[in-house]
Every structure is written in C-alpha cells, then in structure tokens.
Amino acid sequence: MNGAVLGRLWICLFLSGAGALVQEVAWEKYLAVLLGSAAPARALILSVVMGGMAAGYLLGGRACRRMAAPLRAYALLEALLGLWCLLFPALYRLAGWGYLEAGGGPALRFLLCSALIAPPAVLMGATLPLAAAADSWGGAALAGAYAANTLGACAGALLAGFWLVQAAGLDGAMAAAGLLSLAAALIARSMPVAGRAPESPALESRTWPLAAAALAGACALAQETAWARVFAGLLGASTYCFTAVLAATLLGMGAGAALARPLLRGSEPGKVLGWALAGSGLCVLLLLPAVPRLPYLFHSITYAMQFWAPSYGAHLAMTFGLCCLFAAAPAFFSGMALPAAAAAGGWGRSLALNAAGGALGAVAAGFLLMPRIGMQGVLAASAALCAAAGIAALGRRGLWPLLAAGLLCAPALRPWDPRLTTYEAYRRLRAEPAPSYRAFREELSRGNLLFHAEGADADAVVVRGSEGKALYVNGKAEASPRDLADQVLSAHLPLLLAPEGPGNVLVIGLGSGVSAGSVLRHAGIQATAVEISPEVVSAARLFAEENGGVLDDPRLALRIEDAAGFLRLRGPSYRVILSEPSNTWVAGVAGLYTREYFEAAKGRLEPGGVMAQWFHLYEMDDRGFLTVLRTFRRVFPHASVWNPDSMNLLLIGSNEPLDFDAARFLRRVSDPLVARDLSRVGASAPETLLCLQALSEEGVERLAETPGPEHRDLRPVLEYEAPRAQFQGEWSRLLTLHDERRKNIRSSGLLLSRWLSAPPRRWTKKTSAQVSAYHERHPGLADLNALAGQAERYRKR
C-alpha cells in the first residue's frame, strides 16, 4: 500500500477511534442515569464494552485472513456502527423504560448493558484487524493501525470530555460519534479496492505472547484506574480531571504504538515485547516516589500561573500536562507491548486477550486490590509484575527478575501519607504555597490521622485538627465542625415543616452521620440512609459523639448504593427526603441535581411530603445557582429557600402548599430531644429557625422564571460549568440581592410574617437576643439583627 493510500487508511482509523471514545464517554453517562454511578455499575459497563471488543477483535482477526478485500468489510462495519449511534438515543429510551417498568435487578442490568452497548463494541473491535490487514501482515502494520486508532481515541476523549457533551448533550455527542464513523466508512469506501496484502512469514504462535498481551492489558487498565483516583484525590475530582487521565493514557499508548511500527520492522517481536513490558513497569516504579510531592508541585505551579496564565483553559492544560507526566509515560511502553505481542502470537487472539485482560485488571484493581493494598499498592504491584515479566522475556529467567523487581519496588513502596488528600491544593490556587516541600510536610503533619480507608468508590480520611474532626472523601472535605449547623438544620427544618406523626425519612448521603442522627431526634421517625461508599460509613463511626451513635440505632436502615438509581426504581414512600450530596463540581454528583432526579424524588414522596435539597453558594456562580433553583422549582410547585449559614442553603419543595401552623411548630420545636439537638447550634428558639428562610414561594417563583437552561440527565450543564466556578473561586450573590428578609416583613410571604401574625406569641428582647446570638455564630448571613429589630417593632403594633 503506497504512502497516500496508507495515510487515508490511518485517517479512517483516527476518525474511528475518536468516534469510539465519544461513544464510550456517552455510554457511561447514559447508563449512569439508570444504573447509577457506583463502582459495580461502572464495572459492569466496562466489562460489557471490553468483552464486546474482545469478541470483535477475535472475529475480525479470523475474518481478515479469509477475506480478499478486508477494507470493504471495514467500511461496512463502520457504516453499521455509525447507524447504531444515530439510533442509540431511541434505543436507550425504549430499553430504559423497559428496565424501570420491570423493576431493575442485577440480571436486568446485565441485559440492558448487553443490548445497548455490546453490539457496537463488537463492531468496534472487529474494525481494527480488518483495517490493518489492508496494509500488510505483521506487527508493523498492526502497530500503525493501532497508533492511529488510539491517538484518535485520545482526541475523542478530549473532545467529549472538554466540550462536546457540554455543548450538545448526550444525544448530540452520540450523533457526532455516528457522523465520525460514517465519515470513516465513506473514506474507506472511496479508497481503491485492493486484495489482502501478502502475508508475512508466519511466526510460531506461542503461549507467552498471548499471556503477555493479557498481562499488558490488565496492568495498563489497573494503573489507569489507580492514577485516576490518585489525581482526583490530589488535584480535585472534577470530570475534567478524569478526562485528563484517560486522554493522557491514550496519548501515551498511541505514541508507543507509533514507535513500535519501525521497531517491529527490524527487530524480533519478542525482544520488543520484553523491553516494552520492562519499561512500563520500571517507569511506574520510578514515578511512585514523586507522587507525595504532587500536591505541593500543583499548588506552586497554579499559584505562579495566576500572574501570567490565569485562565481556566491554561489550568486544564497544566493539569493535563501533569497527568501526561505520570500516566502517559508508562502507557507509552504499554502501547509498544500490544503490537509486539500480536506480531508474535497472532492478531485476533492477542487483541482479544488484551481487551479481556484490561477489563479484568480494572475490575480487580477497583474491587479486590484497592481496598486491601490501596492505590499505591495497585500501582507498585502491577508495575513490578510487568517489570519482572519483561526482564524474563529478555532472557534473564529464574530468581533474578523477581529480585530486580523487588529492589526497584523498595523506594516505591515507602507509604504515602494519607493526609496528602486533605491538603486540597485545588482550593488554594490563589494562596501562596509553603516556601519549601519540607514546610509543606510540616503543615500536613499538624492534623492527627484518625482513619483511612480506600475502596472501589472512595478514599476516606478522618483527621483531627485544631477545630476538631474532619472527614475528607476523595480529597475533598465533606464534614467538619464548621458544617455542624448546616447538617443539623438541614435535618430539622424539613421535618418541622412536614406533616406531624410517625413516618419514614430518606437521607441521601450519610457523610459524618450528623444529619441522620438529627432526623432520629423526632418521635416516631424511621430513617433510611443511602450512601454510595462503604468507606464513608466506616468513617462515620468516628463521629459517634456528633451523630449520637446513629449507625447503631435500630431505627436507621442503611443502603450502600447510588441514590439516583435507588430513587428511580419502585419503592416505599417517604414523609421527607433529605438530599445532601457533595458539591456539583465533583464528578458524578451533578446527577443528583437534575430535573429527572428531582422528579424521581417527587414520585417517592407521600401526600404532604417534603423534599429538602442541600446546595452550596461558595464555589458557585450566579448562573449555576439559578440553574439549580430553576430546575428544582419546575418540579416542585411550592418551593422556598432557607439559609442555615452563609455558605450553604436548603431548597425545600412540596407538591402541596406547606400547612404551617404556629402552635404546632412551637410544640414540635419544644420537644426535649429536638430542642436539645437544636441548642448545640444555637437555634433552639422557633423564631431563630424562621429567620433562616430567605425566599418565600413567591420569591423563588420570580427568580425561577428568569430565562436559562435546566440541568438534565442528558444535558448535564452543571457538571461542566461548576468546575470552572470552583476554579475561579466564585460565590453566588443572587440570594443576597433577592433576600426577602431585607424587605418589609409584613408584605413578605415568609413564614416569619405568619408567625408574627399568629397569637399568642410575642417577640421579646430575649427573642431578639437569641437571633442575634445565632447571627454572631454566622456573621456572613443576612443582617438578622436588623430583622429581629423589625420583628420586635412589628409585634408591638
């Protein structure tokens, strides 16, 4: 095949790879809507994708040996893949409806994934050997095809993760992927018809190259899984961080395959394979000792960049560069290994075993290894295995490879300090870093480590600092003493406004367990807590003093699963649903703020039930605040906004107007257990609680009517906009501008106005003192002192 035709073939493979990664990114987000984003769901999706691709590799590898014109078959498969992409949104909606109607379950999850993504995955796998066979037989041809395809996949990952899904939504992204596949099919169809190239002299098919292909795939995917968790914990767990790790890995593999093409023309494939495996392992082992310096390095670079490249785009480019430094370098050698293994062991079987090994490596790393040996252990063990296998392949068999790998592992296995993830470098971008790495280490050592656990979904750390205990999940603070008022009041406010009497409450997001503990202070209440991570549940036990030992309370039922998937399936109704997820910029969390999520919660409320949704004002701009408020209000016709402290707010919504009765409210607040719990945050007076309402139903309606987008499952605008607001240190001021507490109470729709109008309550100086005391605890709130004075004058009339 001449150079011009070969270039067109590589363009086809580049477009095919780009379309494939756009599809895979979209598949994960589509299916997360139905299955949730917990580790078991992600593992199922990955297994089906990699299993389908393995089957396609095997079928394509066998078929290309018998076909006279494999390029025609390649064009046909690309066209079928493009058509599947265009039909996918309709197929997804049909299959999703059937899944929810049937009630879900493990078997249905597998059938759903298999029906939607296994057929295109098989087509993807079959295209690579068919296209490569149009060039020539041998490892060099496959290396060129694999390089073009993988570099295209890198471009597709960057396109989908940084722009396409945000701009066009999931349906638009899938359509774009289909057009890329159709473009590849048209280019391939226009190329001159050529028979299968003459086969190179057959190499003996041995077990070792096939085992090496599987090993390379397993170690590469295990390392990618671990690197993603490392970078998320140290640099911030936004969707852009995960995209950067994926793209860096693909870039390294594509570059390695490109280098393997000339090497395989003049070298023994087994020798190239040995050097590639050894290089991959040794590279990781040499990089591991540098990981503890990563937060300090990241902080120092980002602080310097604010003076000469302060844009968010420059920040993302720098993050991608760091990911390339750590993840792309070992992936470079992994990219060399697969073509070499295929040249020595056969295309179809080598590619299939590599894909199957990749699925096994990722699942084993997440579920089996990480909870036992941690991220560092996964990286070190997989690297040592690769290094030992590579050294053995080069002829140094026996004990020496193991000894060499063990010696190289020694510095890499020096344990990382779990407190590294508590530094939150991504939140210190404008703060001057420590003058030296030693000073950085001293700052970390001030916190006393109480707990650390790693699992498939989360890395949980509890430290005791000068203010008290704090819980960090995947490198982000989720509970600390400064959050106590927010957590306690987020539980009490919706329960005090909901109908009285025995009932069930759903708490989404356990965290430190404080909110769940406050829920159970109310008589006759049974609670169900849904938490995605078992490591967080274990960490919550260290907060028994703060949460009242809620995990040992028989009235609490604990469910370890994804909250969105839990709500969408049929189940019991609840008096109150309290949703306290993490911040919207954290990858996957924005799915707990979509219209579909709110509709699922609304469908699980009993008559008169109340939905309470936590949200943050910090690290959020006005556009994001309005998007959440608008989305919530369009689901719940009766919505109000409450402001427990200056940093957070609570959206309270219901299907019917709140049945507020002043005497009943006073009686419920005065319950001894409830009053004692409220007193620890200085809010035991009913007037103090009512002063926390910032927007009435009318105020919410006025703001929600402003034009703008909703946050939807298939158009997740917040997932991509929130990280930018977090980087820029935004703070939404809209609530301050429209706060009804700054207006005349008598003309407002706030519940405080109804309280002041209801006899026999009187607003006294003691009441004003209680409100002022709460304001002193939270000085960033609206001027509650002025509000108290206005209320006191109003009651004297």
Image (cartoon, grey):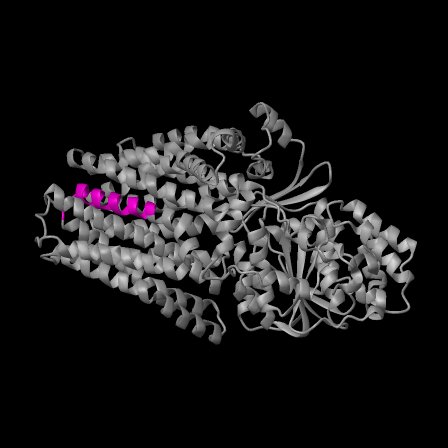
Q: Main secondary structure of the magenta part?
A: helix
Stretch of the chain drawn in magenta? 135-155
Q: Position of residue 402 (x, y in %)?
A: 38, 33
Residue 137 seen in the current view: no
Quadrant in the picture for the N terminus:
top left
Tally of numbered discs: 0
Seen at 27% across and 55% down, the residue is: 180
Seen at 60% across and 55% down, the residue is: 581
Q: Is residue 131 above or below residue 794?
A: above
Q: Position of residue 539 (x, y in %)?
A: 64, 49
Residue 151 part of the magenta segment: yes
Residue 660 seen in the current view: yes
Q: Position of residue 744 (x, y in %)?
A: 78, 59
Q: With 401 as the anchor, is 37 left or right in this view?
A: right
Q: Position of residue 635 (x, y in %)?
A: 58, 68
Q: With 656 as the anchor, is 783 left or right in this view?
A: right
Query: Which residue is nearer to you in this view: 632 or 599?
Result: 632
Quadrant in the picture for the C terminus:
bottom right
Query: Which residue is nearer to you in this view: 763 or 152?
Result: 763
Seen at 26% across and 38% down, the residue is: 273
Q: Is residue 390 above or below residue 554?
A: above
Query: Which residue is nearer to you in this view: 430 or 130?
Result: 430
Quarter occupied by residue 481: top right
Residue 448 part of the magenta segment: no
Seen at 48% across and 29% down, the residue is: 308
